[in-house]
Image (spheres, rainbow, N blue to C red):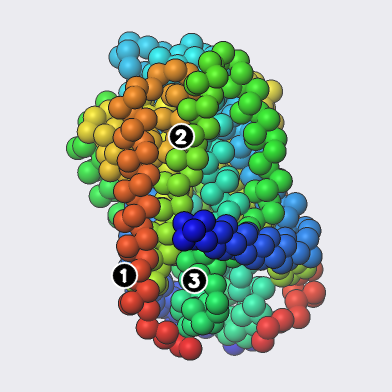
Amino acid sequence: MIKLPKKKTVDKYLSVFKISFQQEFAYRLNFIMWRLRNVFQVFLAFFLWDTVFANPGMVIFGYDRAKILTYVFGLILIRSIVLSMRSVDIAPEIAKGDVSNLLLKPISYFKYWFTRDSASKLLNLTFAVFEAGILYILLRPPFFLQNNIFYILFFILSITLAIILYFLLVLLFSMPTFWFPQQSWGFMFLLMVFVDILAGGIFPIDILPSNIQNLAYLTPFPYLLFIPVEIYLGHFNFVATLRFLAASMVWIFILLFVNNKVWNLGLKSYRAEGR
Amino acid sequence: MNIIQNLQNLANKIYRYFKLWLLMSKNAFMVYILDRFSLLIFLFGKLVRFLMYFVFLYFLVRGTNTLAGYNVNQTIFFYLTFNIIDVLAQFLFREVYRFRSLIVTGSFDLVLTKPMNALFRSLMGGADLIDLITIPPLLIATYYVGSLLNPTSINAMLYILLLINGLLIATSFYIAVLALGIVTLEIDHTIMIYRDLISLGRLPIDIYKEPFRSVITFLIPVGVMISFPAKAMIGLISIQGILVSFGLAGISMFLSIRFWNFALKKYTSASS
């Protein structure tokens, strides 16, 4: 295999990034509708917590009004950077046999999709900042500003790990399509349900009874949204924060290993149906 | 004589369409049964989502005692009412989710040329078996939680009437989505926006602040669809509220059918 100089490899993925970014603008109405959906979801969460914490001095489940509303607003930004991605198209691509196109090209399949995801994240994050600004002006929530530099650094690290973790989870939930081409959407639907419920996408999971919480912590999902926001809010001490970051890394290694095995097995069963 | 004849014709027409609906639903169910694994995945996902939100609401309101003045049972009842309307609408109108491909491929021509109302075919052409499975337990749960609220028979009757009214408003939303689909070729996100909008009714409308509350009560009548029936069961609805509900259902149905007729004229039969 011919090895390209490092600069050429970077250029290759930079081109993928640029093209992918432009593609996002090709379906502008779709994109606007998608962003609008995110805003509606914020409304429900905001007003729910605004009502629960109507009394400003109230502390429930370890949250005060400022912290819970920071959780809601923080989710807009964290969702846009962690959950926005194009690689949800991997499963339908496998089902239609379109994976062959990329496998034949001198490009890493996973790096290609990670680059496309990055373009999607950049665009979604830009819009999310804008939306959060408008919602902030409209709703005027109290905001918890973290001033401990260590928590901010840990928060950034947890977001980085969450991005990698979600990418690996999407890959994992896409790969059963190798064996069940009809179910490409079914597995992604399951992933979305788990993310909404166990990742804290709808409500902070520490509201649930401790046995359900413990069960959730055994899965990789809380490390996607809940743990990063909680780290920002300073809900964990340093030791607990480090433990959660380590757990997140362990999940990344487990998923890297499992994905590698499943991908190789999947390619052996892949028949490029539909090509 | 003429009136009797007209009524008889109408009854025959309803019967014929009911038979058509049964036939189309049977065909749709056969597709689901052929793909049992998919059916199980979606059923499992939907149940998990429903139960976890239920658990969340239960523990939230138990921890805070009330939510906007409603106790645990009342809050859960709002949530169940939301689910009844949402699941019934999805069961009946699942075909809407498949409408885009008919429009972009021009296959909608085949619907238009058949001796069947095109709106009926586009709206109710394929009932959802997964939602059908979830309806009986949902109804039982709603009946049980409803009975804990000690409603009078009038409250219960009003609840059922307003529930049907809510379903009519949901129908007009779905018709509007279809019409918008013809005009803009966009269905997937529009239907999801509708789902997001009605999910605002998952909780009592009283949690929202003005002017947002009025917007989602009257302009986008999510409150009328979901919160009003639940409030009727609790005995918190006024005569004016009931009249406004029926009026809004009539207006939204009228406007959505007008929009559908307008959209039909914009259909270009592209790609056919």
In the image, what residue occupies the spot 56% across and 31% down? Answer: B80
Counting from the top left corner in percent of width and height, residue A215 is at: 69, 31
Residue in the foreground of this view, choosing between A234 and B218: B218
| Left or right of A246 on screen, residue A70 | left
Q: Quadrant of residue A139?
A: top left
In the image, what residue occupies the spot 56% across and 51% down? Answer: B90
| Left or right of B236 on screen, residue A216 | right
Q: Where A265 falls versus A99 (above or below)?
A: above
In three-dimensional space, the C-alpha distance between marks 3 and 1, rounded to whole angstroms, equals: 14 Å
In the image, what residue occupies the spot 63% across and 26% down? Answer: B143
Amino acid type of the residue that numbered disc 3 sits on in the rendered structure: Ala
In the rendered picture of this protein, how many numbered marks are placed on residues? 3
In three-dimensional space, the C-alpha distance between marks 2 and 3, rounded to whole angstroms, equals: 28 Å
Asked whether residue B117 is in view, the answer is: yes
Q: Which residue is mark 2?
A: B162
Q: Where B157 falls versus A268 (above or below)?
A: above
Q: Which residue is mark 3?
A: B118
Q: Which residue is mark 1?
A: B262
Residue in the foreground of this view, choosing between A7 and B235: B235
- Whichever of labels 1 and 2 marks the residue nearer the N terminus, that label is 2
Structural crowding at the residue carrying mark 1, measured as other residues with C-alpha within 10 Å and reported as few (<14), some (14–19) or many (≥20)? some
Q: Secondary structure at mark 1?
A: helix
